[in-house]
Amino acid sequence: MAPMATLILVRHGRSTANTEGVLAGWTPGVRLDEHGAAQAAALPARLAAVPLAAVVSSPLERCRETLAPLLAARPGLAAETDERIGECLYGEWSGRKLKELAEEPLMEVVQHHPSAVSFPGGESMRAMQARAVDAVRDWNARVEATHGEGAAYLMCSHGDIIKSLVADALGLHLDLFQRIHVEPCSVTAIRYTRSRPFLLRLGDTGDLGSLVPRAEGPEEKGDSGDAVVGGGAGAS
């Protein structure tokens, strides 16, 4: 099982939409909040021991802001943009409050049968996963061809994109991807080989605070057990 690339997936830091309980999607002007900026500032030290052959970013501002401290700490390393790892196209759901969306009949399908979901005026969740997986396969080949087998590269993306990539790596049906959770600015690592991927890290923040029970947040609705569409604000 010769190694191919190791993919370091970073979810963007906590954003203003996360703390306001809004499903941002591709809504312009969504930036990191103060805590998200601090998370991004800590990223270079967390990844200091990892040599990166390439950095790839979603085109959305909150991802580019998350990467800025890392790129400043590594002169000569620049981020390339790939729209295929941009946030899910939520269409008419974009910019709306998650508590409001929880009342939509489609939300039950999003939670339990996401492979059947097509957002009004947006894209299907199957299409979201397919484009993200295609992007990773293309970048795996590109990094391996340029930097050799076993090279590591980083992608900064979004909660639902990362969850769908983890589901693909684990061989899980998309209908099970809502069982996966990734915190803002967390690190997920997948090592690809000729025969199978290996999940090395999942939503790693280096902080166990996310395991502490907490009061209901702005994007949550009681104790329903539903996944937060878009990924949520995290534990802090």
Image (cartoon, rainbow, N blue to C red):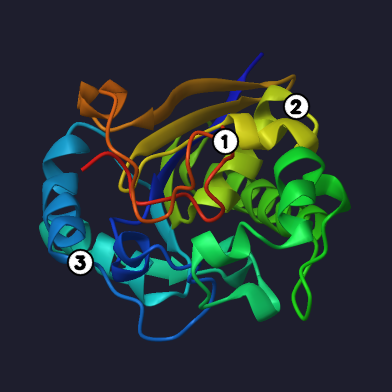
Q: In the image, is residue 59 above or below residue 171? A: below
Question: Can residue 226 be seen from the camera position used here?
Answer: yes
Residue at the extreme right of the image, as rendered: 116
In the structure shown, which secondary structural element does the residue marked by tag 1 occupy?
loop
Which residue lies under the disc numbered 2?
172
Q: Give percent across and percent down for residue 13.
A: 28, 55
Q: Give percent across and percent down for residue 3.
A: 57, 23
In the structure shown, which secondary structural element does the residue marked by tag 2 occupy?
loop
Q: Which label sits on residue 33?
A: 3
The three-letter code of the residue at mark 2 reads: Leu
Earlier in the chain: of badge 2 and badge 1, it is 2
Measuring 66% from the left and 60% from the top, which residue is drawn there? 103
Q: Residues within 10 Å of mark 1 (few under 14, many from 20)?
A: few
Which residue lies under the disc numbered 1?
224
Measuring 68% from the left and 78% from the top, which residue is drawn there? 91
| Relative to 32, 135 lies left or right | right
Earlier in the chain: of badge 1 and badge 3, it is 3
Earlier in the chain: of badge 3 and badge 2, it is 3
In the structure shown, which secondary structural element does the residue marked by tag 3 occupy?
loop
Question: Can residue 75 be seen from the camera position used here?
Answer: no
CA distance for labels 2 and 1? 23 Å
Mark nearest the camera among 3 and 2 is 3
Check contact, mark 2 vs mark 1: CB within 8 A: no
CA distance for labels 1 and 3? 27 Å
